[in-house]
Image: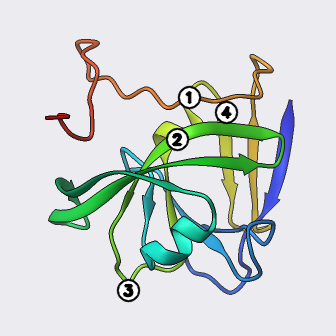
Amino acid sequence: MEQRFNLEVSADRPVLKLDHLFPGCTALIDTGALFPVWTKSRELLEALGAKMCKRNVLFSGFGGNAYGDIYTFTLRLGRLIYPEMHIMACENNDIPGYFIFSATMFKNTVYTIDDVEKKFVVVTKDFQVCRNIVIKDADGVMHVLCEMV
């Protein structure tokens, strides 16, 4: 299954339009990111239906360490569904967009960032609609965003 999404024409980085969530919503596609991040107000994220899991978690990102909150959020991206996806929420208005979409969101797909035509193309050769983010290291050990205490 192939899906094509529009990128922001004026952006100098791959910024995906997410107007189906609300007008003006965008996501920076970060091929080096390990997990998705919400970069704006938590109130807006909660208004979109996200549920808080854990507050004030230390994580590595934004060029160093930062603190954020873990939420679950069901994201629909075209025909792809990310049910109860874990995301970090860490307000940073220097980041273009509301989300940072991590490369791990597109595991087991072929994705292309076409900066000439300003398109983001995702091909799911397994034809699976529901995508679950599973983050493992080179030894197959699963990473978690935090330890639940």
The residue sitting at the top extreme is 139
Q: Which residue lies under the disc numbered 4? A: 110
Provide the secondary structure element on which disc 2 rests: strand
Q: Quadrant of residue 13?
A: bottom right
94 left or right of 20 in image: left
Q: Which residue lies under the disc numbered 3? A: 94
Q: Quadrant of residue 10?
A: bottom right
- Coloration of the structure image: rainbow
Q: Residue drawn at (57%, 80%), measured in percent from left and top?
A: 12
Q: CA distance from mark 1 to mark 3?
A: 28 Å
Residue 116 position, x and y percent, is 75, 68
Q: CA distance from mark 2 to mark 1?
A: 7 Å
The reply to whether callout 3 and callout 2 are in contact (CB within 8 Å) is no
User: Mark 1 or mark 4: which comes first in sequence?
Assistant: 4
Residue 33 position, x and y percent, is 38, 51
Q: Residue drawn at (76%, 48%), measured in percent from left and top?
A: 121
How packed mark 2 is, by other alpha carbons closer than 10 Å (few <14, some 14-19, many 20 or more), is: some
Q: Nearer the viewer, mark 4 or mark 2?
A: 2
Q: CA distance from mark 1 to mark 4?
A: 16 Å
Q: Which residue lies under the disc numbered 1? A: 132
